[in-house]
Image: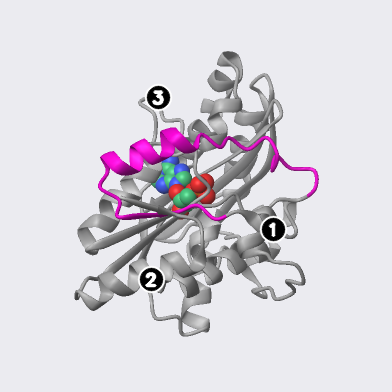
Amino acid sequence: MQVVKTVSDVREAVAIARDGGERIGCVPTMGALHAGHMSLVEDCRERSDFVVLTIFVNPTQFSPTEDLSKYPRPLEDDLAKCREADVDLVFTPEVPMLYPQGFETYVELQHIPNRLEGAHRPTHFRGVATIVTKLFNIVQPDVACFGQKDYQQQTLIRRMVRDLDMPVEIVVCPTVRERDGLALSSRNVYLSESERRSALSLYASLQLAQERIQSGETDLHAIRTAMHDLMASREYVSPDYVSLADPNTLDELDTPVPHMVALVAARVGKTRLIDNLVIEL
Ligand code: AMP
């Protein structure tokens, strides 16, 4: 496994693989790798011959009040996991490599970033769209894998790739959860034991929505209130939003449709968590 820090080293390694007829796969991450990330690697392995995993805690997707400086960075552990998973190339750039002095070009979408995560984190998706575009330009993958866990993010990336004719196939992989339902997240390490117990209310509220919608209830307003109240009733939990939305546009729905998505975000103590569940009727 090669570990490189510069754009030119990535380009060189990828060019050799491509010249050998290999299909290039890419898994962008911010590191602190867990089984969710590794499920993307596994999927990417099956769809490509040369897997590039990127580890970059992207400053432009954090607001000044967020956890950029304390975001976990266990690089040696991450590299060991990558080796075990047969990753071919790990790209671990420093910030000035990707945002050199004078950087002033950003990628922005018009509609998708304005709600949900974007409403709570106004510059977040501009940072995501920009870094993913840069990584695609650097790696030039044939296929790239993202998690359903970050539902709005994958919606935005799929839209951006279509809108800008980027020649890459986007694959969305299912959310990996702990046995008790908690979605794996690099931020779960911030949770105390009692906060972690309360954090289960995010998934519980999604399941509540699924059960009530699948059993024929049509009052989505009442269901949103119940989801909110379930989370808010747990110690340490302050819900940010509860959404029952169209799975492609993320527009809020008035009545159930055959294919929809429930999304929640909440602060649990000082840690902000998100989760979602696709609901089929
Ligand atoms: P991050 O390191 O948080 O930026 O995540 C990198 C990629 O891993 C994104 O595509 C995430 O959606 C995905 N991911 C994060 N958590 C999970 C999970 N629990 N299951 C599946 N994919 C995940």
Do callouts 3 and 1 mark residues in contact (Cβ within 8 Å)?
Answer: no
Crowding near the residue tagged with mark 3, few <14, some 14–19, many ≥20 C-alpha atoms within 10 Å? few
71 in magenta: yes
Amino acid type assigned to the residue bearing label 3 in the image: Asp
Q: Is mark 2 within 8 Å of ligand 1?
A: no
Disc 3 secondary structure class: loop
Amino acid type assigned to the residue bearing label 1 in the image: Thr
Q: Earlier in the sequence, mark 1 or mark 2?
A: 2
Disc 2 secondary structure class: helix
Q: Nearer the viewer, mark 3 or mark 1?
A: 1
Res 252 visible: yes
254 or 139, nearer to the observer: 139
**Inter-mark Cα distance, 3 to 1:** 33 Å
Residue picked out by circle 2:
12
Segment tinted magenta in the rendering: 64-93
Residue picked out by circle 1:
60
15 or 26, nearer to the observer: 15
In the displayed structure, 158 sits above or below 163; it is above
Res 251 visible: no
Residue picked out by circle 3:
180
Location of residue 96 in the rendering, given as x and y in whole percent from the top left corner:
67, 60
Q: Earlier in the sequence, mark 3 or mark 2?
A: 2
Residue drawn at 67 percent across, 64 percent down: 99
110 in magenta: no
Do callouts 1 and 2 mark residues in contact (Cβ within 8 Å)?
Answer: no
Location of residue 8 in the rendering, given as x and y in whole percent from the top left corner:
47, 69
| Image quadrant in which you'd find residue 145 | bottom left
Residue drawn at 48 percent across, 76 percent down: 161
Q: Which mark is residue 41?
A: none
